[in-house]
Amino acid sequence: MDKIYIFGHKNPDTDSVTSAISLSYLRNLDHKNTVPMILGEINNETKFVLDYFKVPKPKYLNDVKLQVKDLNYQKDCFLCEDNTLDELYRYMEDNGVSAVPVCSKQHKYRGIITLKELIKIVIDPHYSELYSSYQNILDLVRGVEVTKFLDEVKGTIKYFNVKGYDGDSILSNKDILLVGNDISKVQEGIKNKVQLIIMVGRRNLDKSVITHAKRNKVSIILTMQDTIFVSRKLVLSNYLKGVVNTKRESIDENTYLNDFLVHFNKYKHHNYPIVDRKGKVLGLLSSQDINDRKKKQVILVDHNEIDQSVDGLEEAKILEIVDHHKVGGINSSEPINIRNMAVGSTNTILYEMYKELKINPPHDIAGLMMAGIISDTLLFHSPTTTELDKEAVNELSIICKVDPKEFSKKMFLQAASIEGKTIEEIIYNDFKAFNINKYKIGIGQMTVIDLNDVMKNRVRYIKTIDKLAKDNDYDIFMFCVTDIINNNTYVLYNEAAKNVLETVFEINHIDQGFCLRGVVSRKKQIIPLLMDELN
Ligand SMILES: [Mn+2]
């Protein structure tokens, strides 16, 4: 079954991480193969929540861009380098392919052979290389073993008794001798200690000849097939490793499709060997497979804007969105199941969905959902809080048997922990970036219990904010420090935005760290003001 990725926004917060997990649980009960993912490192608060309810951290998802592995190429199409040209031909026939990747015994990529290359070898009248096993040769020429002193043969085929043979050629141990029914030629081969003699049109040899061959360690095969049959089969008994084109590069299945297409448009090969990260051969991609693409399937929670979402979202198929933010920014070519409600947390919506389906979340999932709601509503202090949020927390707390008040105290303490973090990390820890008209805006927010944690380093914060704004072309860059005990937010900002912010917040004169009384929600109390003023 195809995997479906569920994830919240970049700079994940507790609501977005826990809602991905709780929705994934719900969908998988319905036999879907969903996986919760994160788009960035989790913060201290979320880490505390996951540890508290003993739920593993979701895996990181870098992007959902189309990759070569999303193309419907021929999986498991390859041969081993010890296979023969004869087997290659049959394989091409049976599988309807015009090229085959070749690998080592350990499945590592060696090269590729195309039908064109195979034909070139077969129709070349002067092709006389032979590298194969004694057994392969015996089987292909339908021969009987007379003597055998080697497992593998590697040399040049010489035709004795056949028209065109240069009688003066000197035979050596590099040679494989193909002779007609003429004992004197066989004896000459034995005398010169060739590697192997294949004699056609004969069922047996005199004892004296065999003794001679044994003394000189010359291998002999007899066959009743005619010379033309045998000479063709000798060429076809060659190992693939002797003829494979090792110059053709393989393509890693993780290569982005767009990068591959650049390569494809440059070389325009018909066939590409596909390998995994370790160079193991996976199959064959033909040029006609390039349009047979399978988009990655995703479900968005706690966000619906492309800027806040995973890289490459435009190349993916969005199946569903569950969110409590304003709607905007996503265009789709197909309908999407969207559940958007004006409540304090995505987990509140999810809990509604659980109830509609008459499913009780297990206690750890219930705990995560409760934590998500408490985090987003700042334990109902945020004006985004609705009765539904309170009701959900109340019911979830009964399921997970954790007191919400006690729990939130511990959780907010973790949220406020800035131990071991750089100022830049603290600013970006919970950060939203967006555009209003021509303004590029970034707002970081942090909840604190003790305001002094930040304000004692005020000057360093301001410097960092100014630098980040300049380096990243933000017109307005704010860092909101929210005191959740007294429900106030203190704002640090880039100097260039001073005048705009005075207008936005209708304050005659602002200073670094100015106070927005009763303001705790960036989403509901800060962003709307910016939108009103700048739009
Ligand atoms: Mn949320």
Image (cartoon, helix red, strand yellow):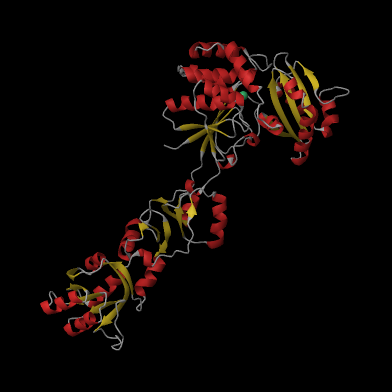
Ligand 1 located in image quadrant = top right
Q: Looking at this view, name the residue that lies furthest to the right.
A: 508
User: Residue drawn 51% across and 48% down?
Assistant: 254
Q: Residue at x 42, y 52 (%)?
A: 280
Q: As rendered, which of 63 and 428 lies closer to the eye?
A: 428
Observer-nearest residue: 249 or 450?
A: 450
Name the quadrant of the C terminus. top right
Percent across and percent down for residue 142 are 20, 68
Determine if residue 306 is in view: yes
Q: Quadrant of the N terminus?
A: top left
Say left or right for 480 vs 369. right
Rendered position, 438 above or below 199: above
Q: Seen from this angle, which residue lies furthest bottom?
A: 168
Q: Is residue 180 left or right of residue 169?
A: left
Residue 523, image quadrant: top right
Placement of 485 over or under 253, stated as above or below: above
Percent of width and height locating residue 433:
70, 33
Place of residue 428 in the rendered image (x, y in percent of width and height, measured from the top left): 68, 32
Q: Quadrant of residue 92?
A: bottom left
